[in-house]
Image (tube, rainbow, N blue to C red):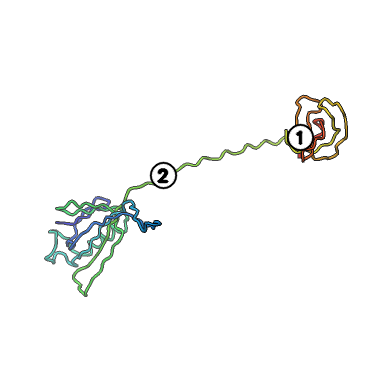
Amino acid sequence: MQFKLTNNKNKTFALPVNPKEIQLDYGTDDKTVSVIKLGQINLIGDEKLKTIEITSTIPVKPKQAHYLSISKPYAKGQTYLDKLLKIYKSKKQVRLVVTKTKISFKGIMTDFKYGMTEGYADEYTYTFKLTENKPHKAKKVKTSKKKKKKVAKKGKSRSAPPGKVGRGSKVVVNGRLHAGSNGSGPGMTERNATRKISLIAKGAKYPYHVTTLSGGARGWVSKSAVKAV
């Protein structure tokens, strides 16, 4: 059995000493919530990223060690450490294959540490963890551009159109009141009186019937006698 690592440039090397054990870590992102009159329940979440962790040793001088898992090791143990460190720093996917098993794991090396223990200077100890990397891609969403408001070209100045009035409009009246829209029954003259249009007789000589703001009838007035507030 051998533990082989293949980097993103398709370069493969085998670890010189097999780890004592290997475990693939599976899990789901569950959440516990409390429900009235029921207590705590478990909400099953989606699958978490799978991980795998390797802990083993590397002889300082591999060719002089008798407990290797491979037949043709590098001359220096530091060479293995350099390769592992390079994989870690690359932040690229690496594949771990364990021969004679179905284990073939692809992921990013998210943790790596090494050193020496118990004052033993003839071998390095190390640990690294591979974390599954699910492919994903950010999608660029186009936002609709706001249309620019057209600006009228500068020209000769002209007076602004009179304010539009209609039934229910609040207006200021300056003119004589009449009993009918045809001009019959002329009566009082309004001066800067704030009124409300209650009726409109299109085409009539005095087309607007005005009332007080509370609804009291006043009479019919000409178009020129009213101005929108």
State which tag comes first along the sequence, 1 or 2. 2
Type of the residue with mark 1: Ile
Q: Quadrant of the N terminus?
A: bottom left
Q: Position of residue 153 (x, y in %)?
A: 68, 35
Tell me where residue 128 sits by quadrant: bottom left
Horizontally, residue 126 falls left or right of residue 200, namely left
Q: Secondary structure at mark 1?
A: strand
Label at residue 139: 2
Label at residue 197: 1
- Number of numbered discs present? 2
Q: Is residue 157 visible?
A: no
The residues bearing labels 1 and 2 have C-alpha atoms spaced at a distance of: 57 Å
Horizontally, residue 29 falls left or right of residue 66, namely right
Q: Are marks 1 and 2 in contact (CB under 8 Å)?
A: no
Q: Is residue 170 visible?
A: yes
Q: Quadrant of the C terminus?
A: top right
Q: Position of residue 224 (x, y in %)?
A: 81, 32
